[in-house]
Structures are given as C-alpha cells and as structure tokens.
C-alpha cells in the first residue's frame, strides 16, 4: 500500500470511529483493563520469601477461599488468613500462607491455587526457600556446661519450623525455641560433673528427617561446694534460730530449699542470696523439742555450677538443759577431786546452782565454772566411799525459754587405796606399792622382778588400777598390796637383770643362794649378787614382806602359761586353784627341769624358809601384753582362801 492509499485508509476508519458511541468506548476500556488486571493477578507468579522464624504469608485478595484448590508439589501446603465472612460463608481472604509439609529444601517451589482447581482465577506463587538456620559453633563446642541449667545453643536466625534435640552419652533431650536460641534441659540427662562428653545437636521435621547438624566435645562444670553450713545432719539447736546460713565456694544465683517438720509439712521460709551466701530465713519461730528436715535440693552458681547431689539435713530443737558429760568414771576418784558436769546448752544466769545441784555421800561445794559447766569439789571424802552427784530438774536454759524436765544423778566412788614408795632402784627409780582394803589378812602381789618380762608389769599395774575403782569389793577381812614393778631399771632398759646386772630373782637370802648363777647362755659371775640381798630392789621387797607378813604372795613372771609353788603351807592347793581357773599347767616339783637351769636365791623360797609364807609363781603366756582380763577371776579367788 503506497502512502496515498494509507492516508485514505486511515481517513476512512477515522470517520467510522467518530460514529462509535462513547459508551462503547468505555465498555471496551473496562474489558481491556480487566484483561490486563486479570493477567497481572493470575498469570504472573507472585514471589514469596520463605521464613523459618514464623509464618510465611503474602498479602493477596483471595475470593471464596474455601473453594480454592491447590496445585503444587508435596513440599508446601496453602492456608489463608484475614478471612472475611458473610454469615457463615467465607467470602474472601487477605493473605495466602504457606506451610511446609516436609523439611524445607533450599531452592524455589511453585504453588498455584484456583477456584475448584480450574483455570479461571488461577493464582501462582514462587516461594524461595533459603538455607536453614545453623548453630553458631562458638556457643557450643569446647564449652564448660552446667549439669543443672539448660544448655543454650545460638542459631544464625530463629527457627520454628524444625524440632531440635540434644544428645549426650546416648541420652537425648528435646530443645525449646526462644527467638534465635535453643534451650535444651540437660538436667534430665543425669550428667556427671567435671566430665568430658561428646554432644550432638539434631534437627528434624515433625519427628522425621532427623539429621545431625553439629557434633563435638563439651565438659561439664565442677560441682559447687558448700564451705560452711549453719547445721549438719543430726544437729541439735539449743538457741532460737531466725535463719540458717550457708556459704559456697563461688557466687550463687538460684536455690531450691525446703524445710519440713516431722509430719512432712512444709515450713514457711524465705531464701536470700548475697554473693556466696545463702540465708534460709524463718518466717516464724520453730517449736521446741521438735524434729525437722532441711532439704537443699539445688543451688546453682553464676557460672552454672551446681551441687553434686541434694543435701538433706535432719535436725531438732532442744528442750531444757541436759547433762551430757561428767569428768569422772564409776570409781577411783580423788578424795578432793574437782568434778566437771557439762550441759548441752548454757544455764541461765538467774539459776542458783547451789540450790539445784549437790553431792550426796560426801562433803562438797558446787559452783558454775562456765555457761555450760558446773564444778563439784569434794572435800576430804572418805576413802573408797560411795557418793552421788545430783542435779535437780527445772533448770532454765540460757539459750531458749525451756527448763529441764528431769533430774540427773551419777554415782561413783573415791579412790580405793593409796600408794607409797618402798624403796629405790640402783638408778634411783622409785619402787611403788599400792594398798587396798583394811583387813588384817594381807595378800601380796608382785611383778617384773625380771625387767625383760614386761607383761607381768602391765598385768599387775592394771590389777592395781582396777582395784582403785573396785577395791570396795575386797572382803572386809582382807588387804591387798601390789608391787607392779620390782625392777624399774630393768623394765626401762628391757633387761632381765637390774642396773648392776644382778638377777633379782636370785638375790634373796635362801639356803641355796649362790653368787654365780646359771642361765641358758651359761654362768653369770655375781648374777646372784655379791651377797644375799645385796641389791636395793631386793632389800625394799624383803623389808615390805617382813612388815606385811602376808597370808599369801603371788609373783608374776613370763613366759610359759605355768603355775609354780614354794611348797610351804597350802601353796600347792592354792596353785591348783589358780591353775584350774586360768587353764595353766603346774610345775611344783619339776620347775628346774621345765626351765632348763638351776634356780637359787628365789624370792618365793626365801619367804617360805624365813616365815613359812605360801607363795605361788605365775608364768604368763608371753613376755609382752596385758593379761589382766584372763587373770581377773583367779586374782579374786586369791582373796577367798
């Protein structure tokens, strides 16, 4: 078409267009605009950015949302928000939202919706899915973690789409979300404190698609330690407490403390924390004479350290004062002793102790020595006399408002017997005799005439100590004299002989005394002394024996579990009683054969020759040891002959 024809064609249609009505132009414009808007709204996909932090929604006018059908992959489901209804009929929604149906995969997902799944009003969306949030490694690996507080993992962003769990040592715990942090309650895992572990963080979607997204080492914190406590298990409280204070080795943040009475009922308290101090404050006064249990279930430090295990402390509140100690035993008390009686709590200053405390059976005075002690001072009490300490009830406490509910008594005896020095050894050591009873008939006991036989000394010393308490049992017609250590120099050096190398058991003036003595190792020159009775120890024992002229003498030696007799008077019969009581063999007529060497100048023989006194000799089982327990019955029988 040439230019002239084109001009004519245009003029021709311009004339026709001038004759089209204005209404037709308007209708055509509306139709064209509607087609354009429709194409924009329904055929052009709308971009949507998927969010892990919350709902993934986009503003969009959706007519009749209940009629919409979704055409998409299995990755996303569509739901609607901002729904407006007429009556019960949903007319339109203002938002289209997308929810994953499985763990989101990075990339782009296309979603189409249309009424009843047709082509009319087909709406398309292009949903972009980014990488899932990742844990920040520096908040997890290599950390020292608490066994009592939640294990917190920071994410690069919040994630409410996935579920997270933490596993340690084959045990797992679910983690909760808080913005971009995961909180995993590891207290349920029973972890040990101060221990290395491997931790794994797992991510899943609706219980499926579990994946380990992090794994590495952690170490649990060392336990929090209590350094000081107001009470401990079994404590008795004498004062009126207002709080219980505890100290720890580091600053603390939280605590869980419960106080219960004997019925298991909770007693009101308030916990107050000040740096390393925990004060459990009472809201009311605790009743007296009651039992309680304080449970420190948990204390957590600022670092996250916690108690290694709960602490349970049972305690009680006291009543009035009670006597808890006395400084004497059942006997052997000095005639002028000062006796301390100790109470479990202070005595009120208003108490007149002289009015509530006294001694029955002996003269004494009573005074308050300290807030918790009374002193009873005896004044020339009778020897071996029985007496009783008495404290009346009704004594008021100095720590609380209670008074004692019962009286207290304690019986004892003053020392039975006395001691005196009968001579001195070569090196100046005293030779001591102990006297018990007041009868006219004396039984004499001796030990350690040979210093290398200390069991005889230990046994006789224990016999003397025993009678200091029990001497009142001695028959009224008897007196007991004990010389536990005839040869103190020999005992001190462990030598059989004295410091002059004389065998004291061969130094007595008998008919068969000899200066030289026989032993296992041969003859000892002057082993029996330079003359009969030449040694100071021998002289002391001779003088004592002549003074006492005992009914019976019993000598203790070692070793062999044997009983001998000097064969004067009834010594053999007495020896049989002793041997039968302790189960020893006898050696009345073959002592030298049993011992293996001749024996001269013996103490027992001298007694029989000079005074006709029966004497027996006891060979204890060993050189060492204390045989008082096995000899006690036999010793008492010696006083009944």
Image (cartoon, rainbow, N blue to C red):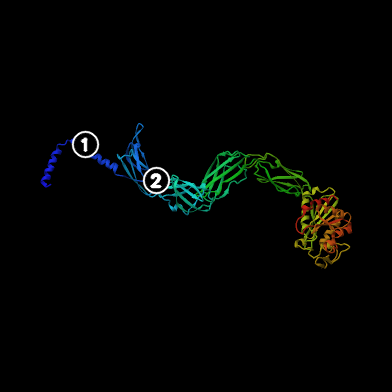
Corner quadrant of residue 542: bottom right
Tell me if residue 617 can be seen: no
- Counting residues from the start of the chain, the first of labels 1 and 2 encountered is 1
Q: Residues within 10 Å of mark 1 (few under 14, many from 20)?
A: few
Residue 81 x, y percent position in the rendering: 36, 39
Q: Residue furthest left?
A: 4
Q: Is residue 284 left or right of residue 568?
A: left
Q: Residues within 10 Å of mark 2 (few under 14, many from 20)?
A: some
Corner quadrant of residue 395: top right
Q: Nearer the viewer, residue 150 or 388?
A: 150
Query: Mark 2: which secondary structure?
Result: loop
Q: Is residue 167 left or right of residue 559?
A: left
Q: Nearer the viewer, residue 560 or 135?
A: 135
The reply to whether discs 1 and 2 touch (Cβ–Cβ < 8 Å) is no
Residue occupied by mark 1? 27
Q: Is residue 261 left or right of residue 432?
A: left
- CA gap between label 1 and label 2 equals 47 Å
Q: Which mark is residue 53?
A: 2
Query: Mark 1: which secondary structure?
Result: helix
Residue 458 x, y percent position in the rendering: 76, 56
Residue 359 x, y percent position in the rendering: 74, 43
- Judge depth for marks 1 and 2 and give the one in front: 1
Q: Nearer the viewer, residue 598 or 324?
A: 598
Tell me if residue 168 can be seen: yes
């Amino acid at each position: 078409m040439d230019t002239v024809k084109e001009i004519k064609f245009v003029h021709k249609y311009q004339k026709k267009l001038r004759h089209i009505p204005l209404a037709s132009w308007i209708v055509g414009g509306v139709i064209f605009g509607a087609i354009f808007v429709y194409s924009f709204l329904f055929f052009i996909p709308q971009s949507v950015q998927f969010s892990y932090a919350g709902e993934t929604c986009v503003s969009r006018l959706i007519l009749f949302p209940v009629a919409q059908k979704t055409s998409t992959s299995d990755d996303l489901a569509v739901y609607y928000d901002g729904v407006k209804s007429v009556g019960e009929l949903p007319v339109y929604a203002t938002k289209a939202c997308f929810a994953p149906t499985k763990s989101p995969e990075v990339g782009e997902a296309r979603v189409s919706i249309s009424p009843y799944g047709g082509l009319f009003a087909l709406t398309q969306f292009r949903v972009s899915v980014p990488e899932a949030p990742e844990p920040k490694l520096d908040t997890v690996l290599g950390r020292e973690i608490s066994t009592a507080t939640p294990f917190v993992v920071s994410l690069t962003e919040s994630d409410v789409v996935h579920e997270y769990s933490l596993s340690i040592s084959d045990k797992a715990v679910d983690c909760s979300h808080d913005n971009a942090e995961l909180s995993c309650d590891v207290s349920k895992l029973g972890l040990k404190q101060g221990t290395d572990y491997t931790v794994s963080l797992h991510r899943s979607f609706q219980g499926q698609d579990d994946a380990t997204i992090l794994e590495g080492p952690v170490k649990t914190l060392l336990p929090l330690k209590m350094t000081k406590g107001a009470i401990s298990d079994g404590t008795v409280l004498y004062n009126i407490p207002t709080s219980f204070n505890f100290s720890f080795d580091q600053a603390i943040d939280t605590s869980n403390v419960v106080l219960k009475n004997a019925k298991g009922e909770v007693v009101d308290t308030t916990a107050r924390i000040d740096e390393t101090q925990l004060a459990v404050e009472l809201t009311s006064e605790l009743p007296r004479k009651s039992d309680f249990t304080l449970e420190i279930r948990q204390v957590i430090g600022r670092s996250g350290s916690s108690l290694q295990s709960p602490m349970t402390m049972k305690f009680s509140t006291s009543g009035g004062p009670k006597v808890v100690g006395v400084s004497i035993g059942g006997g052997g008390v000095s005639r002028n002793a000062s006796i301390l009686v100790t109470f479990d709590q202070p005595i009120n200053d208003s108490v007149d102790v002289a009015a509530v405390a006294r001694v029955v059976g002996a003269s004494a005075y009573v005074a308050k020595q300290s807030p918790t002690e009374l002193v009873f001072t005896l004044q020339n009490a009778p020897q071996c006399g029985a007496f009783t300490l008495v404290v009346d009830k009704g004594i008021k406490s100095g720590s609380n408002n209670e008074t004692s509910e019962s009286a207290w008594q304690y019986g004892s005896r003053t020392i039975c017997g006395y001691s005196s020095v009968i001579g001195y050894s070569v090196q100046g050591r005293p030779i001591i005799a102990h006297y018990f009873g007041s009868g006219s008939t004396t039984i004499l006991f001796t030990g350690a005439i040979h210093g290398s036989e200390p069991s005889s000394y230990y046994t006789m010393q224990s016999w003397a100590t025993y009678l200091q308490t029990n001497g009142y049992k001695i028959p009224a017609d008897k007196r007991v004299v004990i010389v536990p250590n005839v040869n103190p120099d020999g005992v001190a050096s462990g030598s059989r002989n004295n410091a002059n190398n004389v065998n004291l058991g061969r130094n007595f003036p008998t008919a068969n005394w000899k200066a030289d003595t026989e032993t296992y190792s041969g003859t000892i020159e002057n082993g029996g002394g330079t003359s009969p009775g030449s040694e100071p120890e021998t002289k002391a024992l001779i003088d004592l024996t002549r003074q006492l002229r005992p009914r019976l003498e019993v000598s203790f030696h070692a070793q062999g579990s044997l009983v001998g007799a000097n064969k004067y008077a009834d010594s053999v019969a007495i020896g049989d009683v002793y041997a039968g009581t302790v189960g020893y063999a006898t050696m009345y007529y073959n002592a030298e054969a049993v011992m293996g060497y001749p024996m001269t100048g013996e103490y027992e023989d001298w007694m029989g020759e000079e005074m006709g006194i029966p004497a027996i000799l006891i060979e204890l089982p060993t050189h060492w040891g204390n045989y008082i327990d096995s000899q006690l019955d036999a010793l008492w029988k010696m006083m009944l002959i």
